[in-house]
Image (tube, helix red, strand yellow):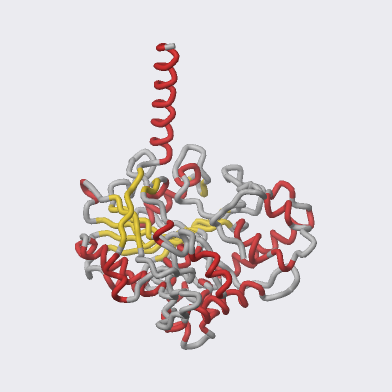
């Protein structure tokens, strides 16, 4: 009995050690209580929050700010559905968050940024940190203050040492990747003049195309987001001066004007975009695309042909940015969405590669000006390094569908 207990203890210890080594450390939450007085609050009125693992050694004055993703809310109903989740309230955010991938503190998992100050900013406003509406409806008690949240968090981090930054990256995944594009230049403006500042967007290059029914679904959706949250005044003026504000929520209309160096990582067959821009449920009432969206191996030849067409539209939207020696991009042909916070797709022996480089290596070399990186993959299914997503139809996910 004793031996069995010891064996069980050893097994549990080894299992936990493996989990800790692969998933990274756990980081405590920090609430930005000072933001409340400035009206910088989540949808439910709670204070903004982030998780910060302090830099060490040569990385003590280097900062990587990772903006969380999680879709958007485009009307009162969808915002109320977020209000009591971590995407609408810091009260629902986890106290201790596992850091892995680009947030790992181990050099074997994150060679270029492991000893930086690594920060994960909680996403609780539903507008990619662009909203600012002063009025609060007493019935719903919804606060649309994403832009104030962004500034309050950055001011808190500046006071905690980011004002001395020598290197800094604003990054993010999905809606957070869009945030890193929209706020890139304003982020750089907050930092010391001599600091090396760049921005990085993972799966944030959402394109403006019609869905399979011919409807402009994503354009209408973004129009509702921008209108509800009062985002227009916080979108890049160089874009809003010539286009309707909702069109300035699309990176293809903004990124060419970003002055700060920008790196884009995206799957040309981005699983979220296929599910929500190309074939949203509203455009597929009989569910012909359901199995295909869950698993690309279940797509028919006709569906794959349509997806290849989507890839070409994605590449056209990317190429429309024009040439830039400071911009980097890693566009693979995987069926994936967000590839940087997960260790298996960020930096591992079997991680996705282009030109024999992982995303981590390509981004690190680009940031430190060792090598430029602008690579586009061949069409699916040629890339054998992909980790293609397979979705559980019954699983609850915060990778919000629209």
Residue that sits furthest to the front in the current view: 139
* Image coordinates for residue 178, horizontal then vertical, percent: 48, 67
The C terminus, quarter of image: bottom right
Q: Count the labels in the image.
A: 0
Query: For the point 42% across and 46% down, which residue is it?
Result: 101
* Image coordinates for residue 295, horizontal then vertical, percent: 68, 48
Is the residue 2 above or below the residue 328 in the image? above
Q: On the picture, is 239 further left or further right than 39?
A: right
Is the residue 91 above or below the residue 10 in the image? below
Query: For the point 57% across and 43% down, which residue is it?
Result: 385
* Image coordinates for residue 94, horizontal then vertical, percent: 40, 52
The quarter of the displayed image where residue 222 is located: bottom right
* Image coordinates for residue 158, horizontal then vertical, percent: 24, 65
Q: Is residue 369 visible?
A: no
Is the residue 212 above or below the residue 224 in the image? above
Taking depth in this image into account, of 182 and 140 the one nearest to the observer is 140
Q: Is residue 54 visible?
A: yes
The N terminus, quarter of image: top left
Taking depth in this image into account, of 39 and 348 the one nearest to the observer is 39
């Amino acid at each position: 009995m004793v031996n069995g207990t010891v064996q069980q203890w050893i097994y549990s210890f080894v299992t936990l050690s493996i989990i800790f080594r692969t998933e990274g450390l756990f980081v405590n939450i920090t609430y930005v209580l000072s933001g409340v007085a400035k009206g910088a609050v989540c949808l439910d009125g709670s204070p903004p929050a982030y998780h910060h693992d302090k830099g060490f050694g040569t990385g003590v004055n280097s900062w990587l700010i990772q903006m969380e993703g999680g879709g958007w809310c485009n009307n009162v109903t969808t915002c109320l559905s977020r209000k009591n989740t971590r995407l609408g309230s810091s009260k629902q955010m986890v106290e201790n968050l596992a850091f892995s991938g680009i947030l790992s503190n181990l050099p074997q998992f994150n060679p270029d940024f492991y000893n930086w100050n690594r920060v994960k900013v909680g996403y609780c406003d539903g507008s990619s940190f662009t909203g600012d509406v002063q009025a609060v409806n007493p019935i719903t008690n919804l606060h649309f203050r994403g832009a104030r949240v962004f500034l309050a968090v950055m001011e808190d981090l500046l006071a905690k040492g980011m004002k001395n930054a020598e290197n800094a990256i604003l990054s993010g995944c999905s809606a957070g990747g869009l945030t890193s594009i929209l706020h890139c230049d304003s982020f750089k403006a907050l930092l010391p003049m001599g600091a090396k500042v760049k921005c990085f967007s993972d799966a944030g290059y959402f394109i403006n195309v019609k869905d399979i029914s011919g409807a402009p679904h994503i354009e209408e959706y973004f129009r509702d987001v921008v209108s509800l949250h009062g985002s227009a005044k916080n979108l890049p003026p160089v874009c809003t001066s010539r286009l309707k504000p909702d069109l300035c929520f699309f990176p293809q209309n903004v990124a060419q004007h970003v002055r700060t160096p920008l790196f884009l990582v995206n799957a040309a067959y981005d699983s979220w975009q296929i599910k929500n821009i190309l074939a949203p449920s509203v455009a597929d009432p009989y569910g012909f695309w359901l199995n295909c969206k869950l698993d690309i191996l279940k797509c028919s030849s006709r569906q794959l042909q349509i997806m290849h067409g989507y890839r070409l539209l994605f590449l056209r939207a990317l190429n429309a940015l024009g040439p830039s020696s400071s911009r980097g991009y890693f566009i693979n042909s995987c069926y994936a969405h967000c590839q940087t916070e997960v260790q298996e797709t960020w930096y591992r022996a079997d991680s996705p590669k282009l030109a024999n480089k992982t995303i981590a290596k390509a981004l690190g070399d680009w940031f430190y000006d060792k090598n430029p990186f602008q690579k586009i993959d061949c069409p699916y299914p040629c890339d054998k390094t992909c980790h293609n997503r397979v979705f559980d139809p019954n699983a609850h996910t915060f990778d919000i569908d629209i």
